[in-house]
């Protein structure tokens, strides 16, 4: 028996929202790997520095999925800290 009827709904929502976000991020990661600009193709092919053993470094575009993951983590950390502080939770 549950004392709070809303608790089951909250657990369902908390399980479905991260799964939906993960599906959207996965779709974006597969559909578009990075932002394309005016010089994207040139940056992919031009080597900036050549190391020993014929290793080359390029100034290629930053992947979109990494931008979204970093931005999502920063937003989550900010709102988690804000919510914890406003609710007066003692850690």
Image (cartoon, helix red, strand yellow):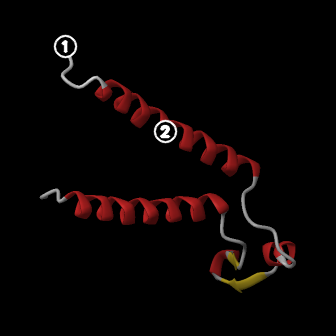
The percent position of residue 11, horizontal first and vertical second, equals 35, 30
Q: Quadrant of residue 26?
A: top right
Query: Residue tagged by mark 2?
Result: 17
Neighbour tally class for label 1: few under 14, some 14-19, many 20 plus, Cα within 10 Å: few
Q: Residue furthest top?
A: 1
Q: Residue furthest left?
A: 90
User: Tag 1, which secondary structure?
Assistant: loop
Residue drawn at (60%, 39%) of the image: 23
How far is disc 1 from disc 2 in space, using C-alphas?
Answer: 25 Å
Location of the C terminus by quadrant is bottom left
Tag 1–tag 2 contact (CB < 8 Å): no
Residue drawn at (66%, 70%) of the image: 62
Query: Residue tagged by mark 1?
Result: 1
Looking at the picture, tell me which residue is in the foreground, 48 or 83.
83
Residue drawn at (23%, 64%) of the image: 85
Looking at the picture, tell me which residue is in the foreground, 68 or 91.
91
Q: For this view, does 58 lie left or right of residue 46?
A: left
User: Tag 2, which secondary structure?
Assistant: helix
Q: Quadrant of residue 13?
A: top left
Location of the N terminus by quadrant is top left
Residue 4, relative to residue 26: is it above or below?
Answer: above
Tell me which label, 1 or 2, sits earlier in the chain: 1
Q: For this view, does 79 lie left or right of residue 1?
A: right
Looking at the picture, tell me which residue is in the foreground, 10 or 46.
10
The percent position of residue 78, horizontal first and vertical second, equals 38, 66
């Amino acid at each position: 028996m549950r004392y709070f009827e809303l608790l089951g709904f909250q657990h369902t929502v908390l399980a479905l929202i991260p799964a939906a976000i993960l599906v959207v991020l996965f779709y974006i990661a597969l559909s578009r790997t990075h932002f394309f600009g005016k010089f994207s193709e040139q940056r992919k092919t031009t080597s900036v520095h050549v190391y020993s053993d014929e290793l080359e470094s390029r100034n290629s575009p930053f992947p979109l999925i990494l931008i979204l993951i970093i931005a999502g983590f920063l937003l989550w950390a900010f709102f988690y800290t804000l919510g914890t502080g406003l609710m007066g939770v003692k850690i």
